[in-house]
Amino acid sequence: MKSAVLAAVVLTGIVASAPARAQHAHAPHEHGVAELRVVADGSALIVEFASPLDSLVGFEHKPRTPAERKAMADAEAVLRNGAGLFQPSAAADCRLTDVALDSPWLQGRRHDHGHDHAHAHAAPAGDGHAELVAAYRFDCARPAALESLGVGLFGAFPRLRELRTERATARGQGAAVLTADRAELPL
Ligand SMILES: [Zn+2]
């Protein structure tokens, strides 16, 4: 992703941009593979996670059974707990201040503040696939100390094999692939 795009994402608010992501099909959607974008800008640390629903709950249709509804609700609960999934460098003293989820069949609220934004909600892709996007904002008291981001997604979602990351921070930009054995992203 180009820096201008990343800057625009920060400026417009990643939460507002998340719904568009959930229904996009910019890249082949590959089960077991998800994307993570991380932008550090001043005191803000923005993390956006986009995944095939299959990698999170094991299906990509509207939940039909109590078990499927529970699987969806459980995944949402895990994803809302951003402080449990993402660990920025402790010295940076980052606090999670915002979480937003979008996916076609969310069982709970899309936004942790309870106010839904005026936007079109994510729709299934139409090809039998569907995604979920989760966006997080941390505010860091000492952003200069931000050196890494620990990622707990693999433990939470065993179907997830690979996380393709892009980052843009004061130290520059880069891309990396994380796996369960390598789940810390240098920033
Ligand atoms: Zn799919």
Image (cartoon, helix red, strand yellow):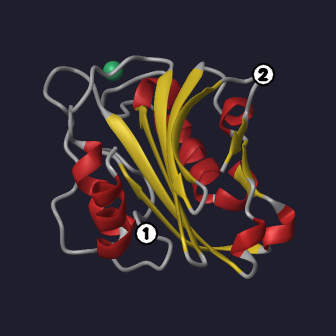
Badge 2 marks a residue whose secondary structure is loop
Farthest residue to the right: give it: 91
- Report the residue at 32% width, 48% height from top: 2
Residue 184: x, y in percent? 74, 39
Q: Is residue 109 visible?
A: yes
Identify residue type, mark 2.
Asp
Query: Is the CB of mark 2 within 8 Å of ligand 1?
Result: no
Q: Is residue 149 left or right of residue 127?
A: right
Q: Which residue is mark 2?
A: 181
Q: Which residue is mark 1?
A: 111
How crowded pointer 1 is (Cα within 10 Å; few <14, some 14-19, many 20+) is rated as some
Quadrant of the image containing the N terminus: top left
Residue closer to the observer: 1 or 83: 1
Vertical comparison of 114 with 36: above or below: below
| Quadrant location, ligand no. 1 | top left
Residue 42: x, y in percent? 56, 77
